[in-house]
Amino acid sequence: MDDFSIISKDRKLTLEEKLTLIQQDNVDILNDLINEYQPFVAKTVSSVCKRYIYESDDEFSIGLIAFHEAIKKYDHQKGCSLLSFAEVIIKRKVIDYIRYQSKSRNVSLAINDQEDDASPVSIEDSLSVEEYLKILEIEERREEIKKFSQLLLHFDLSFQALVEHTPKHKDARKSAMSIAKIIADDLDLQTYLFETKKLPIKKLEKKVKVSRKTIERNRKYIVAISLILSGDYIYLKDYIKGVLET
């Protein structure tokens, strides 16, 4: 703490130093960081709402809460910047809020329908919100894939390579995914993967029942799935969950 205090007198703290202090429960630095990045939060929320967001808007408050959550959850070892990570969290929280508001509106419409004729304008608005949410989800999926593709580059991988090295048989895919889950759930294995950009094969041999040759044959696929399970990729995780359950 004292070291950082001394440094801060001579120069501005880097973002990494601020995050370190925040993880040490420095509330003042946390509040300063949130205030500093309010324009970023407003811009991110506005991009979702497709209109200018004021500080008095509920969406702005939700964006600030989401940014606070992102700061607390951020881990630089996951391969993305704080702002990239925060952008995902903020957009998701705002979309959830819009979806909740849409459902509430639909409930109100249903009640009104029982008492009076349905309002064509209200129904049209409701359908527009639903359609908008679908568009947002498509954009979120596209953005998630883009960010994951950038992460893959750090491991000398690509989506094309992933397709080419996906195990052909269902049992082989499930086995590879199970190995990836072991890595994602084990902090030591996960850290080794992110730091060395290699699979911890020796350690895995002690935890799985498949041969070293099988692990090496499916290395690229296992690495990619491990990265998905270790990161904040809700749509890609849903895909994996579907494969594991079938």
Image (cartoon, rainbow, N blue to C red):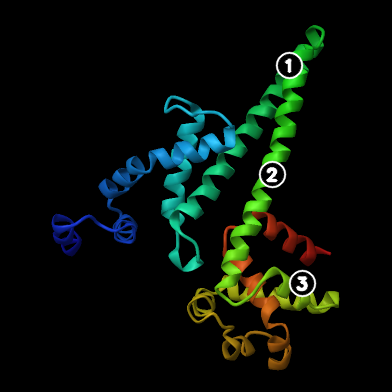
One can see residue 188 in this view: yes
Task: Classify 103 as above or below 244.
Answer: above
Task: Find numbered disc 3 in the image and state the secondary structure of the residue it sits on.
Answer: helix
The alpha-carbon separation of the residues under discs 1 and 3 comes to: 45 Å
What residue would you read off at disc 1? 122
Which residue is at a point 72% across and 21% down the rendered structure image? 125
Label 1 CA crowd tier, 10 Å (few <14, some 14–19, many 20+): few
The alpha-carbon separation of the residues under discs 1 and 2 comes to: 23 Å
Query: Which x, y percent locates residue 217?
Result: 73, 87
Query: Which x, y percent locates residue 149?
Result: 63, 64
Disc ID at residue 163: 3
Q: Quadrant of the N terminus?
A: bottom left
Query: Which x, y percent locates residue 164?
Result: 77, 76
Label 2 CA crowd tier, 10 Å (few <14, some 14–19, many 20+): some
Task: Find numbered disc 1 in the image and state the secondary structure of the residue it sits on.
Answer: helix
In the picture, measured across the screen, residue 11 lies left or right of residue 185, that is left
What residue would you read off at disc 2? 137
One can see residue 179 in this view: no
The alpha-carbon separation of the residues under discs 2 and 3 comes to: 23 Å
Foreground disc of the pair 2, 3: 3
